[in-house]
Every structure is written in C-alpha cells, then in structure tokens.
Image (cartoon, grey):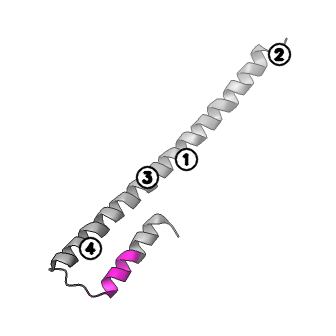
Amino acid sequence: MTLTEKVAYLKGLAEGLDLDKDSKEGKLFAAMFDILEDMALTVCDIDEDLSACEELVDAIDEDLEELEEYIFEDD
C-alpha cells in the first residue's frame, strides 16, 4: 500500500466516524488529513525525483568507467 493510499484509507476511516465537520474536532481532523495528503504527495514527488537522479548517477558512473578503461588501458 502506497503512502497516498494509506492517507486515503485514514480519511475513509475518519469519514466513517461521522464527525461533525463544523465542530472543532471535525475541523482539526480535516486539516490534519489535508496536511497528511499534501505531505504524502510531496514525498512521492521526492521519491520520483530521487529515482531519476539515481538513474542519472548510474549512467554517469558507467560513462566514467568507460573513460577510465580508455585512459588507463596501457597500465
């Protein structure tokens, strides 16, 4: 289960509690779940960016390895 799915699950559980959305508690829970959802989306974006960086670093590493072999092949 992904992070965003877990947040959606929690939101569903909270909706099942039938909290009054105009009460102090209802407003608090709604705000907390909105923040959790934003955080989960941000973490997912960061994870995607990190994966792209890892692929780029791997490509650079392979290119550097080829360059080292070319330069130091006489040694």
The magenta region covers 10-18
The reply to whether discs 4 and 2 touch (Cβ–Cβ < 8 Å) is: no
Q: Which residue is at a point 21% across and 78% down the rendered structure image?
A: 26
What's under tag 2, amino acid-wise?
Glu
Find out whether residue 37 is within the magenta segment. no
Q: Is residue 24 left or right of residue 6?
A: left
Residue 6 position within the rendered picture, expressed as x and y whole percent measured from the top left: 45, 71
Q: How far separated are the C-alphas under marks 4 and 2? A: 64 Å
Q: Between residues 4 and 55, which one lies in front from this camera angle? A: 4
* Vertical placement of residue 24 versus 69, above or below: below
What's under tag 3, amino acid-wise?
Asp
- Element marked by disc 4: helix
Residue 62 position within the rendered picture, expressed as x and y whole percent measured from the top left: 69, 31
Q: Earlier in the sequence, mark 4 or mark 1?
A: 4
Q: Is residue 10 left or right of residue 49?
A: left
The reply to whether discs 2 and 1 touch (Cβ–Cβ < 8 Å) is: no
Q: How far separated are the C-alphas under marks 2 and 1? A: 32 Å
Q: Which residue is at a point 79% across and 14% down the rendered structure image?
A: 72
Residue 44 position within the rendered picture, expressed as x and y whole percent measured from the top left: 45, 56
User: Which numbered disc, 4 or 1, marks the residue closer to the eye?
Assistant: 4
Find out whether residue 11 is within the magenta segment. yes
Q: Which residue is mark 1?
A: 51
Q: Which residue is mark 4?
A: 29
